[in-house]
Image (cartoon, coloured by chain):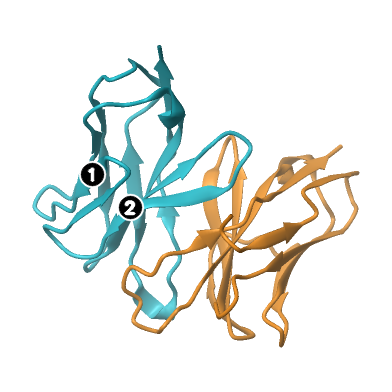
Chain colours: A cyan, B orange
Amino acid sequence: GDSVTQMEGPVTLSEEAFLTINCTYTATGYPSLFWYVQYPGEGLQLLLKATKADDKGSNKGFEATYRKETTSFHLEKGSVQVSDSAVYFCALSAGAGGGNKLTFGTGTQLKVEL
Amino acid sequence: DSGVTQTPKHLITATGQRVTLRCSPRSGDLSVYWYQQSLDQGLQFLIQYYNGEERAKGNILERFSAQQFPDLHSELNLSSLELGDSALYFCASSVDSGTGRGETQYFGPGTRLLVL
């Protein structure tokens, strides 16, 4: 079945540091890929997405590129802020069988310190 | 604010009881999804409804059931509750144009269920 693997957290960085959160996936066909973010006490918000190979999703300084050859969708940000502290989830939607369910990774907690 | 509302925000109940969680999707969205978030299982898809009909089923227990009403709101019913059902239950909605390609799901704030 479909699955998503994310790097274990927590990841602790100093403000203005470079961020990479690794995400790899297993899926049949050509899934769409997503990064969602969950701030403390809140629901999930879409951060960015990509729907086909070599697409780059970007939002609020975050970027991720859909790499079919390595089945990866790593999240990057050049300079993190304290306000980026949250849990980040990589997810895929295979869209097969008439449903659009999301399959999530385990989440990576990011802590950014001054 | 995603536009998806969920009630109640918190729910505390006892083992063996039955509860109903309610979700109102964003205006215009036809699909509603239910997810369970727990420490041991992570975020898991439970079930999807599209315009009143069940479209996809995930790891939903037989003790759990859902439905989507003509006004498109949805309810998730959890019965014979066990301690292990304690979790955060999210509802999400999407337009679901039928292409199955990368449609964004918008999540509600969740209902936190505690079974004692």
Question: Looking at the picture, does residue B115 appear above or below residue B75?
Answer: above
Quadrant of the rendered image containing residue A75: top left
Quadrant of the rendered image containing residue A60: top left
- The structure residue drawn at horizontal position 22% and vertical position 46%, both measured from the top left corner, is A64
Q: Residues within 10 Å of mark 1 (few under 14, many from 20)?
A: many
A7 vs B5, left or right, is: left
Question: Looking at the picture, does residue A32 appear above or below residue B11?
Answer: below
Quarter containing the N terminus of chain A: bottom left
Q: Chain of mark 1?
A: A
Quadrant of the rendered image containing residue A31: bottom left
- The structure residue drawn at horizontal position 88% and vertical position 45%, both measured from the top left corner, is B15
User: Distance of mark 1 from mark 2, alpha carbons?
Assistant: 8 Å
Position of residue A78 measured from the top left corner of the image (x, y, whole percent): 21, 30
Position of residue B57 measured from the top left corner of the image (x, y, whole percent): 55, 70
Q: Chain of mark 2?
A: A
Q: Mark 1 or mark 2: name the one nearer the start of the chain.
A: 2
Say which residue label 2 marks. A48
B52 vs B20, left or right, is: left
| Amino acid type assigned to the residue bearing label 1 in the image | Glu
User: Is the C-beta separation of discs 1 and 2 under 8 Å?
Assistant: yes
Q: Secondary structure at mark 2?
A: strand
- The structure residue drawn at horizontal position 71% and vertical position 59%, both measured from the top left corner, is B6
| Amino acid type assigned to the residue bearing label 2 in the image | Leu
Say which residue label 1 marks. A63
Front residue of this view, candidates B54 and B96: B96
Please say whether residue A1 is visible from this viewpoint.
Answer: no
Q: Residues within 10 Å of mark 2 (few under 14, many from 20)?
A: many
A23 vs A45, left or right, is: left
- The structure residue drawn at horizontal position 52% and vertical position 48%, both measured from the top left corner, is A44
Position of residue A107 measured from the top left corner of the image (x, y, whole percent): 43, 37
